[in-house]
Structure formats: structure tokens, C-alpha cells
Amino acid sequence: MQRFDYRREASAESAARTMSAALGEGGFFAAGGPRVPLRQRAQFIAGGTNMTDYMTLDVIQPQLLIDINGLAARHSNIEVTAHGLRLGALVRMAQAEDHPAVRAEYPVIHETLLLAASRQIRNMASLGGNVLQRTRCEYFRERSWACNKRVPGSGCAAMDGINRQHAILGTSDRCIAAYPGDFAQALIALGAVVETVGASGSRHLSFEKLHRLPGDTPEIETTLAPDEVIVAIDVPAGPWTRRSHYVKVRDRQSYEFAVASAAVALHLEGDVVREARIALGGVATVPWRAREAEQVLKGQVLDVALAEKAAAVAFEGARVRAHNAFKVGTGKQTLVRALMETRAMEIQP
Ligand SMILES: Cc1cc2nc3c(=O)[nH]c(=O)nc-3n(C[C@H](O)[C@H](O)[C@H](O)COP(=O)(O)OP(=O)(O)OC[C@H]3O[C@@H](n4cnc5c(N)ncnc54)[C@H](O)[C@@H]3O)c2cc1C
Ligand code: SF4
């Protein structure tokens, strides 16, 4: 690990200003441009469970770490109203997982947190850091391999390497790395909105617009400006939030990332689907909303045959490599199971 300077900030505004100043003079990218996290010489750090991992591997080499844990005084609350759920960015994963209203009213959020990492990591990891965690692609994590995400233009060792864990949806000729997180699947399914603060002010953006497809520039992973700090995540309430569920399939039953996962939320009238929300994890390069599959369900009676039809539509665009073709079948089965288990949930009036 390389030497770095450390600065702790107490507010989002001061953290953004510090970042902007650090990048402005001799920085790789001007404030306001796209966020290219690996090459950025200053980095935010929250729980540090992802950042220190990549710093010790020398994948990320910041000269300045801006610690945003001081923002917890203002941004670590969980608020539940009739309109929705507001989660501060410095809320720890375990804190949200344990919250009674999250469990009862937004079970898919509770489950995505409960099934992630280990309790020790969830005690430390923040929600803002969780949604911005980096891919687990082994070629990204090991500096001796070619990786367009780590070194733009260097190639992609995963294309013809061991690509069992890699994505089959949203891939490009430059990168096939899977987005690893679970919580993001709940957020994209429920139509969450992210609030940020940057040096030039605050804004709200749809969670669906936060992550970028790899395309020709896999090194640019989000639409955030380099100086933008996430301060909160708002999840709107809807008649589908209580009937929501997450199924995660992984190589071992604990402390493991998803091979395939599905977050589902349904509004049913009898057996008829009035509204359906579907997100897929483990199979795509970004948190993945399966809108076409949702359309298959709307207005129909949900049974196994309909769930299989929706799953087939969800994976229509899949592009497989040598070792990950099995994810098409596993992904479909995961979605069918999630849909049928969500339908079977007993919802208290
Ligand atoms: C062994 C292991 C297993 C894991 N398994 C899973 C799993 O199964 N499922 C899963 O979802 N996750 C898993 N994780 C990932 C873990 O959940 C993340 O490391 C954690 O959520 C990151 O949160 P953090 O606060 O520690 O982020 P940090 O490490 O502090 O930061 C992560 C990134 O986010 C940026 N950042 C942090 N907060 C903000 C903010 N508010 N605004 C702007 N930028 C910010 C940082 O600059 C950095 O780029 C696992 C991790 C480990 C080490
Ligand atoms: S899949 Fe993406 S992250 Fe993995 S080696 Fe290729 S370019 Fe790098």
C-alpha cells in the first residue's frame, strides 16, 4: 500500500469542497467531469470495507483519503413516513437490516442486507459505500492482468479467461464484470432516489441512473461527479413494498456474493398482478431492472407458467462466455422462485 494523506470532514459540503480542491490543482480530472474512481488522486472513505481492500491490493492508490464518517451526525438516520423510507448514507448495513419498519414494510431491503457479506462487515459498512462498491472481478483485483476498468485500453483478461462469475447482461466488448452488490437490487426495483451534495450544490437522481453500463469506458462506473457525496437514499412507499422479497443463489450459503439473484415486489389483487418490480443481481454489469419481464406479468394471473415466461423475457438479451452460460438457466430459475415466493407471502392488513 502506498502512503497517503488523511482528512476527516464533518459535513457533506466540506467533504465536497475538499475533494473539489484536491482534484482541481493538478488532479487527473476537473471537478464536474465524470467520476473515474481508480485514477482519482483523492477518495472518499466511509466504512472502508471496500476501499481498504482495494488499497491493500494497490488497485486504488489515492494520495488523499477524505473520511466522511463525520457526516453521520446528520446522515445516519432512518426515517419512515407514509410516503416512504429515507436512509442516511452513513447508516450502517446492520442498522438498516435490524430496523423493525424496514423488516415489516420493506422486506426486500431487509433481505438484501441480511444476505450480504458477514455481520461483522455489515456493522462497519455504510449504505452509501455499499451501493458504490467495486466489482469482484479477479482480473480487476490482481494488477498483473490486463483490465480496461483498472487501466483503460489495456484489454480484458476475463473475456478469454475464467469467466464463471462474470455478467451476461449489460456487457460490452470492453468489460463483462458483474456488479456485486445485493442492496442495490432492492433499490432499483423499488424506484429509489439518491440525494447528493457536491461542491456546486445538491441534487436528486433516480437510483436507476446512478450506475453506468461499461460500454467503451468501463473505468467510469457512475454518473456522479468526482466531488459528489451521497447523503441519503429515498425509497417511495407503494402497494408493492410490503409484498417484496429477495432470493440470492450463491456457491455457499453464507459470506458469499450472488451467482444469480432476484429482487421482486408485487401488488396483487387476488392472483392478478397490478404492479410488478423486478431486479436481477449477479448476472449483470450494473444493478438491473427487468422492465420487459415486469410488463409480461401486469394484468395477468401469476402462476408458474407466467413466471417462466417473464423469466425467459428477462434473459432474452443475455450474452454468454465460455464458463458463464449456466447463469441463463440459474438466473431464470432464481427469478421464477422469487416470483412464486413473493406471491405466497402472507401480508398482514
Ligand atoms: C469478504 C466480503 C464479502 C462481501 N460480501 C458482500 C455481499 O455478499 N453482498 C454485498 O452487497 N456486499 C458484499 N461485500 C461488500 C461490502 O458490503 C462493501 O464493502 C460495503 O458495503 C462498502 O461500504 P463501506 O462503507 O465500507 O464503503 P467504503 O469502502 O468506505 O467505500 C466504498 C466506495 O464508495 C465510496 N463512498 C463511500 N461512501 C460514499 C458516499 N456517501 N458518497 C460517495 N462515495 C462514497 C468510496 O469512495 C469507495 O469508492 C463484501 C465485502 C467483503 C470484504
Ligand atoms: S471484466 Fe472488466 S473488470 Fe474484469 S478484467 Fe475485464 S475489464 Fe477488467
Image (cartoon, rainbow, N blue to C red):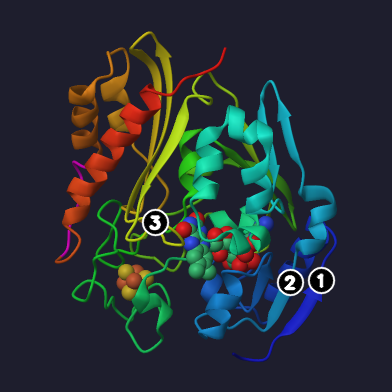
How far separated are the C-alphas under marks 1 and 2? 6 Å
Is any atom of residue 22 visible in this view? yes
Q: Which residues are magenta?
A: 315-321
Query: Residue 26: within the magenta?
Result: no
Type of the residue with mark 2:
Ile
- Residue nearest the observer in this picture, 185 or 145: 185
Disc 3 secondary structure class: loop
Q: Position of residue 31 (x, y in %)?
A: 65, 65
- Residue nearest the observer in this picture, 177 or 152: 177
Question: In terms of sequence position, does the residue under pointer 2 or pointer 3 come before the other?
Answer: 2
Question: In terms of sequence position, does the residue under pointer 1 or pointer 2 come before the other?
Answer: 1
Instruction: Find disc 1 in the rendering and name its residue.
Output: 8
- The picture quadrant where one finds residue 226 is bottom right
Q: Is residue 252 above or below residue 239?
A: below
Query: Residue 317: within the magenta?
Result: yes
Instruction: Find disc 2 in the rendering and name its residue.
Output: 66
- The picture quadrant where one finds residue 55 is bottom right
Instruction: Find disc 3 in the rendering and name its residue.
Output: 253
